[in-house]
Image (cartoon, grey):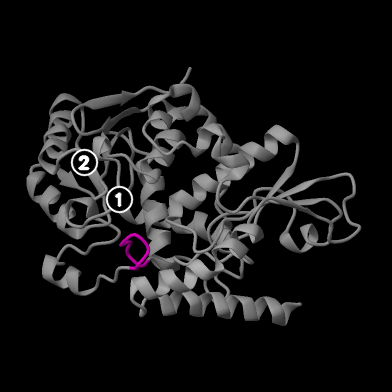
Amino acid sequence: MWKLKRLIHILNFLKYQIREFLPSTVYEFLSSILIKSRENIYKEKFKSFGALNPELTFYVIRRRPPGWGFFSNLFYVLQGISYAEKNNYVPVVDMENYWMSELSSLKEINGQKNAWCYFFNQVSNYELREVYNSKNVILSDGSRIHGGTEWISNRNTNLITTPKLLRKVGNLVSKYITLNEITSKYVTGLKSSLGWSEAETLGIFIRGSVYFTELEFLNSAMPSLDYFIFQVKNKIKTTPISRVYICTEDFRVYDILRRELDNINIIPNLRFGSELTVEEWEKTQELTKIGGLKKMGYERTKIYLAECLLLSDCAYFIGTFSNATSFIFATASSRNIASWLVVSDRVIEIKPST
């Protein structure tokens, strides 16, 4: 069984590596041949793997490979948890047998084969080995849990701007998603090295690549870069902010922001060194053929997660729409911090549910 799982891991790895070298038209043609069989494989189905835990029904949250961005996958897990809660199932996340191309590794990371557990504890007290020897197991749909009708599957600004829904997300995160020991120590160490203090700190998140590359995105959700910078400056002027932390995946946007905000203390960035230039950064960038995303992997994702945890711990937060900002707004909502979402033509104050 172990050898079979190892072989599947290797084949998945090779599949998504090969994709990087094939013309898109060729890869899409080859993939189309397998679409119907894959759709059947990833439909929700009931399985009985053994005699363990006959009194329980496990709900295995799996996503159809190759998955997507880190926080997109996280929200998919939350969607599965919400569905499991509603039906009195025991949720468990499987990113070991279902490959996440931007994250999964052939080697163990932090002693884990399950990519979810690279960063987090399992969402229940049961490990995959026990689940796959249990009597009642439901494998989730790999693309649209419950047909995509769950409220948490709504991928527009409605989730962020509806206090009741935002609080629901925050409650699910608080109840089920905890950092594992290694990740927790990493984040604690970062805060110590940065001399982190939430007081008078403004967290800034901006999806930067949309300004330089053709990415599919909600047009109504993205402000112009000038408009976003104007709103950031306005918040600095009108609130007691003395320092900022800037989070963006695109160094070009980061470079513009730090030049525009040169009159305020900018906390050192976790991704970009102080002497980095745009030319040097551009040489290091590799894009996948999955939506033009940057290659992530464990180390880059660890920094990305840590940044978002820092942002949710700021006294003030302003950002553009994304899965990451949805997570930040939700996890910060319980502390009732001052938060704003900047869209194309206005600033929306995010008010947590009381």
Q: Is residue 142 above or below residue 168?
A: below
Asked if residue 277 shows in the view, the reply is no
- Residue occupying image coordinates x 45% and y 49%: 72
Residue in the picture at 65% in, 58% down: 40
Q: Which mark sits nearer the N-terminus, 2 or 1?
A: 1
Question: Eyeballing the image, is 248 above or below 220?
Answer: below
Mark 1 is surrounded, within 10 Å at the Cα level, by few (under 14), some (14 to 19) or many (20 or more) other residues, namely few
The dot on residue 329 is: none
Residue that label 1 marks: 216
Q: Viewer-proximal residue, 202 or 320?
A: 320
Give the percent coordinates (x, y) of residue 178: 57, 47
Q: Position of residue 127 (x, y in %)?
A: 73, 58
**Location of residue 198 in the rendering, given as x and y in whole percent from the top left corner:** 33, 38
State the quadrant of the N terminus. Answer: bottom right
Q: Is residue 289 magenta?
A: yes
Q: Quadrant of residue 215?
A: bottom left
Q: Please tell me which residue lies in front, 308 or 279.
A: 279
Does the segment drawn in magenta span residue 11? Answer: no
Chief SS of the magenta region: loop
Give the amino acid at mark 2: Arg
Q: Secondary structure at mark 1?
A: loop
Query: Residue type at mark 1?
Result: Glu
Q: Which element type, helix, strand or loop, lies under badge 2?
A: strand
Mark 2 lies on residue: 243
| Magenta extent | 288-295
